[in-house]
């Protein structure tokens, strides 16, 4: 299909399986939330697919349907869940441990949460050093582990009656990795699986299993995972969409709101210092410097792209950008972030901005998991494959075509997402030119 051709979108018939490697704070907050919404006990706040509108046509036409009225999304009543974790807790117990949601809410969806039990994980301690658990697959090599995951996906679909499935990585952040030889082509990757290449991370084995099963894959963590030539080529070859990486929540979300605003008025930047305290299991994993490096690279990339220092060396050529995450158990999932931003204006006069965000990490991430699952499925039914750049709205470290810089500005990302939905339905794209109103 040419990218310009308006797609035929297959209807969302039957159940959609949401497969989650990692049943921790984010996954369980997502599942409990969707189940509570289904029962009318809560509202899906923060989810574009559930409550977002999109303008169509001219401003005078007053056409603003819900996104879910414009494009044929799977209804949340048709979602079923599966997942893998290194711990054996079912999702109800895992949610209690994560301590994000109150027990009285969890008790209202207890039966549904208890029914989601983790399949044994593909795990290698070297890639996530701070945790260990008993629920782990064994295999003679990484290809056998991939085949076991493919079997899990097949059994899951049979067991639940899911007509289709998507996979959203909600596992811990793996250590920092650069693409190696084994990541350069699908053939090299498959050879590496058979030969147990140490450069293949567990998250990449899940992604491979998903793609080989025709299951779209999104990466919510900053790990390299599908962001390699091998898995990007495989996603095209298998006709399966992929998206990533690292949910844009918390401090980086606020950063990508503020930075385009400062840049729009051409205010200069001397420095941006960001620090966080966080006490959940994610924080514990990130206490390992190698896992933190993966997160740090992801968090640092946004400002360079938004400020365009090469175009504006006098404003942005030499700013200091520091990001710190401190593991502080008493804070649990309720992260606190501080930003100190040193800016300068007219004639070089200096100013400061201080931001103190008391956020709830998983509360911000859960609607993103829902939207990604529904949009990945929509994209597949519309015949799209490879990187879905229009989902970069949801990511700190957006994947983009080779040689193309990623778009980090959240307002451009949102426009791209909405224009993609308009394009899918043959509606006019909105350019905001608007001269016709003044003729
Ligand atoms: N919450 C947010 O706002 C946010 C934002 C961006 C990215 N993330 C990323 O999302 C991921 C999940 O975050 P969380 O707060 O739920 O963390 P969490 O620690 O509560 O849950 C992660 C789960 O993954 C499991 N796991 C680790 N390796 C696995 C493997 N190979 N296979 C199966 N399970 C595995 C762990 O046992 C754990 O239960 C993390 O990588 C985090 O960095 C979260």
Image (cartoon, helix red, strand yellow):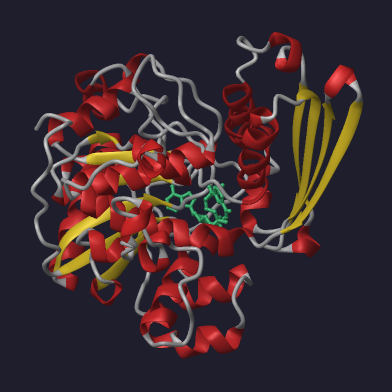
Between residue 245 and residue 41, name the one nearer to us.
41
Measured as percent of width and height from the top left, residue 230 is found at 28, 23
User: Residue at point 57% right, 59% down?
Assistant: 364
Q: Position of residue 303 (x, y in %)?
A: 64, 28
Q: x, y percentage for residue 141?
A: 29, 35
Residue 81 shows in the view: yes
Q: Nearer the viewer, residue 405 or 20?
A: 405
Residue 228, quarter of picture: top left
Taking the image as shown, residue 308 lies to the left or right of residue 5, namely right
61 lies left or right of 3: right
Horizontally, residue 350 falls left or right of residue 130, namely right
In this view, the residue in front, 425 or 277, is 425
Looking at the figure, which quarter contains the C terminus? top left
Q: In the displayed structure, does residue 72 sit left or right of residue 333?
A: left
For the image, the number of numbered tags is: 0
Residue 342 lies in quadrant: top right
Establish if 327 lies above or below 345: below
Residue 389, percent from left and from top: 35, 35
Specify the quadrant of the image occupied by residue 261: top right
Q: Which residue is drawn at the image coordinates 59% and 30% (left, top)?
A: 302
């Amino acid at each position: 299909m040419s990218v310009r051709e308006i797609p035929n979108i297959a209807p969302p018939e039957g159940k959609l399986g949401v497969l989650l490697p990692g049943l921790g704070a984010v996954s369980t907050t997502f599942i409990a939330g969707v189940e509570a919404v289904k029962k009318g006990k809560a509202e899906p706040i923060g989810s574009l697919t559930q409550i977002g509108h999109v303008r169509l046509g001219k401003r005078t036409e007053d056409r603003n349907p819900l996104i879910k009225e414009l494009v044929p999304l799977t209804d949340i009543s048709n979602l079923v869940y599966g997942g893998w974790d290194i711990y054996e807790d079912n999702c109800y117990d895992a949610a209690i441990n994560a301590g994000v949601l109150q027990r009285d809410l969890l008790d209202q969806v207890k039966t549904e949460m208890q029914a989601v039990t983790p399949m044994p994980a593909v795990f290698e301690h070297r890639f996530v050093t701070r945790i260990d658990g008993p629920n782990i697959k064994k295999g003679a090599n990484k290809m056998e582990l991939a085949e076991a995951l493919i079997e899990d996906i097949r059994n899951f679909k049979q067991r639940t009656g899911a007509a289709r499935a998507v996979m959203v990585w909600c596992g811990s952040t793996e250590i920092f990795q650069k693409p190696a030889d084994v990541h350069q082509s699908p053939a090299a990757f498959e050879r590496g699986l058979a030969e147990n290449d140490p450069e293949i991370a567990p998250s990449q084995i899940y992604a491979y299993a998903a793609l080989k099963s025709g299951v779209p894959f999104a990466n919510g963590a900053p790990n390299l995972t599908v962001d390699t030539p091998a898995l990007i080529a495989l996603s095209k070859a298998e006709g399966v969409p992929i998206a990533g990486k690292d949910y844009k929540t918390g401090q980086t979300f606020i950063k990508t709101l503020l930075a385009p605003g400062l840049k729009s008025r051409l205010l200069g930047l001397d420095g941006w210092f960001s620090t966080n305290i966080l006490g959940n299991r994610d924080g514990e994993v990130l206490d390992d410097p190698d896992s933190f490096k993966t997160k740090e690279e992801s968090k640092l990339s946004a400002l360079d792209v938004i400020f365009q220092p090469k175009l504006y060396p006098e404003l942005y050529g030499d700013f200091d950008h520091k990001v710190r995450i401190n593991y502080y158990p008493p804070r649990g999932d309720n992260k606190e972030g501080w930003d100190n931003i040193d800016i300068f204006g007219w004639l070089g006069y200096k100013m400061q901005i201080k931001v103190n965000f008391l956020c709830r990490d998983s509360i911000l991430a859960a609607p993103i998991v829902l939207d990604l699952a529904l949009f990945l499925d929509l994209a597949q039914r519309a015949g799209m494959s490879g990187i879905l750049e229009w989902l970069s709205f949801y990511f700190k470290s957006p994947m983009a075509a080779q040689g193309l810089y990623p778009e980090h500005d959240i307002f451009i990302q949102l426009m791209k997402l909405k224009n993609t939905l308009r394009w899918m339905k043959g509606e006019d794209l909105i350019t905001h030119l608007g001269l016709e109103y003044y003729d």
